[in-house]
Image (spheres, rainbow, N blue to C red):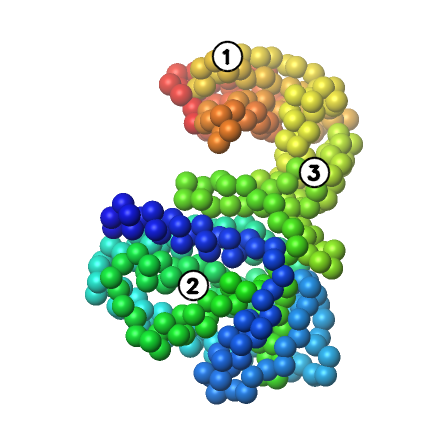
């Protein structure tokens, strides 16, 4: 793939990430027209559309005027008949399209997967798919359907058309555009024979770039990272879903009561390790230069626990890699309370002895 084609692929990726992360009101006429035509292609009349403000509303309400069949509950989405039929339709098209791509070039498919499809898949998992899991913990039983709706599919074949000499038939192009239109026009959609439930997009979304190919994930330090018009929201810290208090009101007391170690870590990072250590009154056990990260220091602190049998310590270290803003992140690692030597504690986190860790050239 030429340099110009790679630049065009990056532009396609950015455009489709924009669709994935859009907070604009849905283009309802465009979405309804495309979905209606997809119904016709599997031999059904166009459905009645029931629009809802969020995935939570879609998964927890029954559209008025219908009596859903027994399997058509949110936690049994994998058993719904229409998603399977639509996936079969689009799966057959994918086989045809991939055959044409392969005839053109053996390297084109893998290259576009790396530059376009997989970054959008990863971004979807760390943003809207996270929201969907938050809306309904059992929603991932329908993961195959939600994956089929991912904007990465349309982005991939849009990139094929715009960066290569591959030519699809008019009917193939029409079906690509029909399937891709809802991803460009609205949120998730859930099809039944007589009615299709469609979610609006979020009204607010906060992300950060975290990958080499422009991947993004939810992140906000002072409020919900994603919010829908009905008030349902998701809080996230660098891609980890957290309770609201972690972003909006982290405190030493709440951290001490939190059982989930990842949630505790996120809350401490939001406060800042230095500030947290001061507020919590953690006692410094020992400090030493970090041989794996020249110029940085390892600091070992006693965690304040009441039960001596739960004696534990935290090792404060500096990340060996530079962040995107040029800084080096400080982070804490829980280590057994038997350690008095920061080098031994650091070595333990890597499965090394203190002597082995001390001989490291550089840690990353």
The circle on residue 289 is 1
Q: Secondary structure at mark 2?
A: helix
Give the spatial CA distance, label 1 vs label 2.
51 Å
Query: Which sits earlier in the primary sequence, circle 3 or circle 1?
Result: 3
Q: Are marks 1 and 2 in contact (CB under 8 Å)?
A: no
Q: Could you tell me residue 271's position as x and y percent? A: 68, 29
Give the spatial CA distance, label 3 vs label 2.
34 Å
Give the spatial CA distance, label 3 vs label 1.
34 Å
Badge 3, how many Cα within 10 Å: few under 14, some, many 20+?
some
Vertical relation: 324 (above or below) 123: above
Q: Could you tell me residue 7's position as x and y percent? A: 34, 47
Which is nearer the eye, 240 or 163? 163
The circle on residue 154 is 2
Vertical relation: 308 (above or below) 230: above
Q: Is residue 348 at all visible to an observer of this figure?
A: no
Question: Where is residue 185, by image quadrant?
Answer: bottom right
Query: Which sits earlier in the primary sequence, circle 3 or circle 2?
Result: 2
Query: Which sits earlier in the primary sequence, circle 1 or circle 2?
Result: 2
- Mark 3 vs mark 1: in front: 3
- Taking the spot 49% from the left edge, 68% from the top edge, the residue there is 181
- Taking the spot 49% from the left edge, 25% from the top edge, the residue there is 326
Which is nearer the eye, 191 or 314? 191
The circle on residue 222 is 3
Q: Is residue 180 at all visible to an observer of this figure?
A: yes
Query: How many dots with numbers?
Result: 3
Question: Where is residue 250, by image quadrant?
Answer: top right
Q: Secondary structure at mark 1?
A: strand
- Taking the spot 75% from the left edge, 29% from the top edge, the residue there is 252
- Mark 1 vs mark 2: in front: 2
Q: Secondary structure at mark 3?
A: loop
């Amino acid at each position: 793939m030429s340099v110009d084609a790679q630049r065009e692929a990056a532009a396609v990726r950015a455009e489709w990430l924009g669709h994935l992360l859009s907070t604009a009101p849905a283009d309802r006429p465009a979405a309804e027209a495309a979905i209606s035509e997809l119904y016709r292609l599997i031999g059904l009349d166009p459905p009645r559309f029931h629009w809802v403000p969020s995935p939570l509303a879609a998964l927890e309400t029954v559209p008025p005027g219908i009596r859903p069949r027994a399997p058509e509950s949110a936690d049994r989405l994998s058993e719904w008949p229409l998603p399977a039929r639509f996936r079969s339709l689009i799966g057959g098209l994918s086989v045809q399209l991939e055959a044409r791509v392969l005839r053109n070039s053996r390297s084109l498919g893998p290259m576009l997967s790396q530059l376009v499809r997989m970054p959008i898949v990863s971004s979807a998992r760390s943003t809207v798919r996270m929201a969907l899991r938050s809306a309904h913990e059992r929603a991932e039983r329908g993961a195959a359907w939600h994956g089929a709706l991912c904007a990465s599919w349309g982005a991939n074949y849009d990139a094929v058309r715009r960066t290569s000499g591959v030519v699809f038939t008019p009917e193939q192009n029409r079906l690509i555009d029909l399937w891709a239109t809802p991803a460009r026009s609205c949120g998730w959609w859930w099809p039944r024979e007589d009615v299709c439930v469609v979610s609006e997009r979020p009204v607010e979304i906060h992300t950060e770039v975290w990958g080499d190919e422009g991947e993004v994930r939810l992140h906000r330090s002072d409020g919900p990272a994603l919010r829908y018009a009905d008030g349902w929201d998701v809080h996230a810290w660098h891609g980890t879903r957290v309770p609201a208090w972690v972003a909006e009101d982290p405190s030493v007391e709440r951290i001490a009561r939190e059982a989930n170690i990842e949630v505790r870590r996120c809350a401490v990072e939001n406060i800042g390790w230095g500030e947290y250590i001061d507020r919590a009154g953690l006692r410094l056990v020992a400090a030493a230069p970090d041989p794996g990260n020249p110029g940085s220091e390892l600091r070992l602190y006693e965690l304040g626990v009441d039960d001596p049998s739960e004696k534990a310590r935290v090792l404060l270290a500096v990340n060996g890699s530079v962040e995107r803003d040029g800084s080096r992140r400080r982070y804490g690692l829980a280590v057994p309370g038997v350690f008095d030597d920061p080098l031994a504690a650091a070595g333990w986190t890597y499965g090394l002895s203190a002597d082995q860790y001390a001989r490291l050239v550089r840690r990353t």
